[in-house]
Amino acid sequence: MIFDSPQILVLRKKYKKQPDFLVPHIILLDKLEKLSGERAYLEDIISSVSEKKQKDWLGRLLSEYHEQYMGAWFEMMLVGWCRDIGQVDIEPNLVGNFPDLSIMVGKKKIVIEARALLKTAEERNEEILSSGLIWALSQIKKSYVVEILEVSSSQFPDWSDFKDRAEKWLNTNPEEKFTYEDGSITVILQTLKITDADFKTVQVIESAGDPRWIDSDPVKQPLRKKAGQHKAIRQASYPYVIALYLESIFLSSKEVVKAWFGNETYVIDIDKHQVVNSYIDKSGIHFLGSRVLHTTVSGTLVFKYEWDKKEKRRCLIASYIQNPFAKVYINPKIFPVGARYVVKERGLKGFRMGWERWEEN
């Protein structure tokens, strides 16, 4: 259905001669042997849903626009993940609303709204540039290890010109650093001495990039939007969970915790060199002054992926973040996650939350 469709045939022809770093992700999924298991997995999932949903997923999954592809891919992978927990319904009609899906666990129907939070345009361009430089250098049939020391760019270079000039450098003066400039990009390279190196093509390593300030701001608006959807469902006291996929390597479940609750501040006894207390600064979206918001969200599932060599596919891995203010409680242990951020202690003055690792019961 997906990988024998007329749309994929058109895309294969269009991108047949393009290097991997310049093709849409659906083409990589289509062609790479290491993802053969994922192709079968997605075919199985799409074959089990209604014709209407098949058309929706197929149209977006086979899109050349990354946002469309990733949204459909995550929804399909999430359905597969949820099927290991309970009975899944796609876009069920609940009090006149149609959420992304629901899971029946025992006698409890849990509503899930999904969102894929993608890399920024800057991150994607940096990724393409890095992959392109590595690809171009690896086309050179010489036994060198080349380190990319510095890159400054406003747009992508002419890849063939970059490759030709780098090859000329390796032919004439490889002991000296090489600077490539074409008016829009500057790349500085050097060779590394590797004893008894015998490579068929140039091997490439990259220097560590500049440090980045990582904050939770990019996560806040997607959470707010999902927390405000399907008011009738939330008011009907269904357990309501947000499933958030984080594509960026710079975002994790810790940033989602900060987005909900704010930054954690520690009180330290200087004389004893010990942390004696901690509190959150209430800069998260749960708080508006003294008010607590989003009490109809039971919790948040945060997803990344890991590669499963045996299954030949990517597998979703999750963390769960409990909402301690939720009107409808869900037992966090129903979700097979790697870690949970949950209420660990309750008292007359409040509660304390913290991370705990999942243990199989």
Image: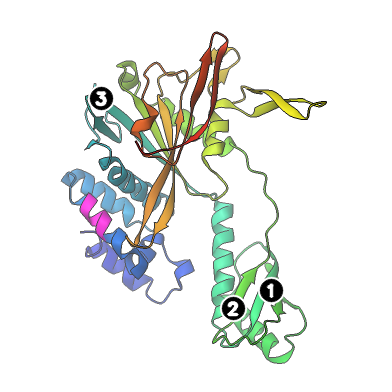
* Towards the viewer: 343 or 210: 343
Residue 20 seen in the current view:
yes
**Does residue 166 sit above or below 60 in this rendering?**
below
Mark 2 and mark 1 lie on one chain; the one further toward the N terminus is 1
In x, y percent, where is residue 27? 36, 65
Query: Which residue is denoted by mark 3 in the rendering?
Result: 108
Mark 3 and mark 2 lie on one chain; the one further toward the N terminus is 3
Horizontal side of 115 relative to 139 (left or right) equals left
**Does residue 141 sit above or below 62 in this rendering?**
below
Taking the spot 63% from the left edge, 29% from the top edge, the residue there is 263
Taking the spot 41% from the left edge, 46% from the top edge, the residue there is 317
Taking the spot 78% from the left edge, 30% from the top edge, the residue there is 273
In x, y percent, where is residue 327? 39, 16
Q: Give the amino acid type for the residue marked by disc 3 in the picture.
A: Lys
**Does residue 331 sit above or below 77 in this rendering?**
above
Query: Which residue is denoted by mark 2 in the rendering?
Result: 203
Q: Which quadrant holds the C terminus?
A: top left
In x, y percent, where is residue 60? 32, 51
Residue 65 seen in the current view:
no
Query: Which residue is denoted by mark 1 in the rendering?
Result: 182
Cα separation, mark 2 vs mark 1, equals 23 Å
Looking at the rendered structure, the secondary structure element under dot 3 is: strand
Pointer 2: residues within 10 angstroms few (<14), some, or many (20+)? Answer: many
The residues colored magenta run 40-45
Cα separation, mark 3 vs mark 1, equals 62 Å
